[in-house]
Image (cartoon, rainbow, N blue to C red):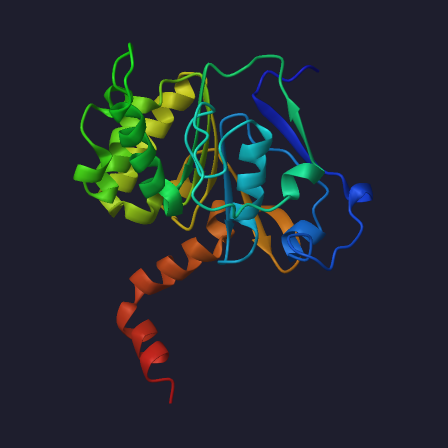
Amino acid sequence: MISTQYISRITLQRDKIDSFERYPFCLPSVRALETLEPHPKVTFFIGENGSGKSTLLEAIAVGMGFNPEGGTKNFRFGTRASHSNLVDYLRIAKGIRKPRDGFFLRAESFFNLATEIERLDDEPSFGPPIINSYGGHSLHEQSHGESFMALLMNRFGGRGLYLLDEPEAALSPQRQLAALARIHDLVVDDSQFIIATHSPILMAYPDAWIYQFDADGVSRVAYEDTEHYQVLRAFFANPQRMLRNLLDPQ
């Protein structure tokens, strides 16, 4: 069957790798990776810091033509070359349709993206300012959370491929719920999301596929089986008991 989703399969070309002892192939999640199939709508990558989820998401983004530091495919700025060469060893299977829109968000380099937008808008141009597509108000003159919501609400236009790396970093729980609602609107409008996250609020999106990155590799897990869900559930069930165990283990 011919796939209609924008990304249907990510395969690590293991035969091209000369050593799994060097970065990023030494990461357990990459070392064990063979093929990963994202959900046609929403896929989450979860795992501890350093587990490789952002490394793989970045490689997918670069393989799809996005700037390593984030933005649309038209952005080509760079402040520091920090991305791995994992993309050179990936085969990304695409559907028969091309996305009309797309964006790669990296929470850690969103400041650089906002700066690049201002730089481009300072240059002479016959077109409207780029910032108009982001709500018309400087991203630097808003809080990190406000600027991300402006991006989500104004720049993401639907029928798109959206790759988001830890989008919850600047969002309050209430804003994470608002982000979920907006993600759903875009999914209904024929969009596909792949999101690396630590947020149990975001990963609760119905019917999403959750891939856990850990010492054993990459595996699909149910939402209720994620450590994020279980830890928070235990905490909220009896916060005082957990705090006693954590702060006074004697």
* The quarter of the displayed image where residue 39 is located: top right
Nearer to us in this view, 88 or 79: 79
User: Looking at the image, is 22 positioned above or below residue 34?
Assistant: below
Q: For the point 34% across and 22% down, which residue is it?
A: 185
Nearer to us in this view, 11 or 90: 90
Q: Which residue of the protein is positioned furthest toward the bottom in this rendering? A: 250
User: Looking at the image, is 12 positioned above or below residue 224?
Assistant: above
Q: Which residue of the protein is positioned furthest toward the top in this rendering? A: 126
Residue 190 placed where, x, y %? Answer: 45, 17
User: Looking at the image, is 32 positioned above or below residue 39?
Assistant: below
Q: Quadrant of the C terminus?
A: bottom left
- Disc tally is 0
Q: For the point 64% across and 44% down, which residue is it?
A: 85
* The quarter of the displayed image where residue 202 is located: top left
Q: Which residue of the protein is positioned furthest toward the front in this rendering? A: 124
Q: For the point 24% across and 36% down, which residue is it?
A: 147
Residue 189 placed where, x, y %? Answer: 40, 16
Q: Quadrant of the N terminus?
A: top right
In the visual, does 61 lie left or right of 124?
Answer: right
In the visual, does 192 lie left or right of 22?
Answer: left
Residue 191 placed where, x, y %? Answer: 45, 21
Residue 159 placed where, x, y %? Answer: 44, 16
Q: For the point 57% across and 27% down, which residue is it?
A: 64
